[in-house]
Image: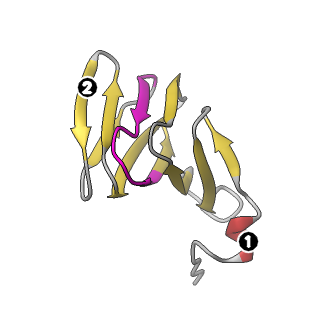
């Protein structure tokens, strides 16, 4: 069994700038996982944006706190706490924090079978 906390040293050491706007950390990734690509947490400050990009894997963005505008291909929706957005493999996607507080998301990714 492996249990990771978002404040664990192993998680904090993975901190990176994700797609131009979010500060992200890998909670679990391919160094441990066998079937799933990764589980990450990302924080977008007010006014910041995860720029539009395409990934070679299926993803889910799950909003923990804050609010924003999620775009997947040509569709845009407001998202908030408890919302999960499915992003198909190869779809362009972005996320804008249009609120007044940090927007914190979990990102789960899995290679296309």
Q: Quadrant of the N terminus?
A: bottom right
Q: Which residue is mark 1?
A: 10
Q: Determine whether label 2 and label 1 are within 8 Å by CB.
A: no
Please determine whether, in this image, residue 94 is positioned above or below residue 106: above
Q: Which residue is mark 2?
A: 76
State the scheme by which the image is colored.
secondary structure
> Which of 32/74 is in front?
74
Q: Is residue 78 left or right of residue 65?
A: left
State which tag comes first along the sequence, 2 or 1: 1
Residue 46: x and y in percent read 45, 44
Q: Is residue 28 visible?
A: no
Q: Is residue 53 magenta?
A: no
Which residue occupies 60% across, 33% down?
Answer: 19
> Which of 21/101 is in front?
101
Residue 96: x and y in percent read 40, 34
Report the span colored magenta.
Answer: 90-107
The secondary structure type at the circle numbered 2 is strand
The secondary structure type at the circle numbered 1 is helix
Residue 29: image quadrant is bottom right
Which residue occupies 60% across, 80% down?
Answer: 2
Q: CA distance from mark 2 to mark 1?
A: 35 Å
Q: Nearer the viewer, mark 2 or mark 1?
A: 2
């Amino acid at each position: 069994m492996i249990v990771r906390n978002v404040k664990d040293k192993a998680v904090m050491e993975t901190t990176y700038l994700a797609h131009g706007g979010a500060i992200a950390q890998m909670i679990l990734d391919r160094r441990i996982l066998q079937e799933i690509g990764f589980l990450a947490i990302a924080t977008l400050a007010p006014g910041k944006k995860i720029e539009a990009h395409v990934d070679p894997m299926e993803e889910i963005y799950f909003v923990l706190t804050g609010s924003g505008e999620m775009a997947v291909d040509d569709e845009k929706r407001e998202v908030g706490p408890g919302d999960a957005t499915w992003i198909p493999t190869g779809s362009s996607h972005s996320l804008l924090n249009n609120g007044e507080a940090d927007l914190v998301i979990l990102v789960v990714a899995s290679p296309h079978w």
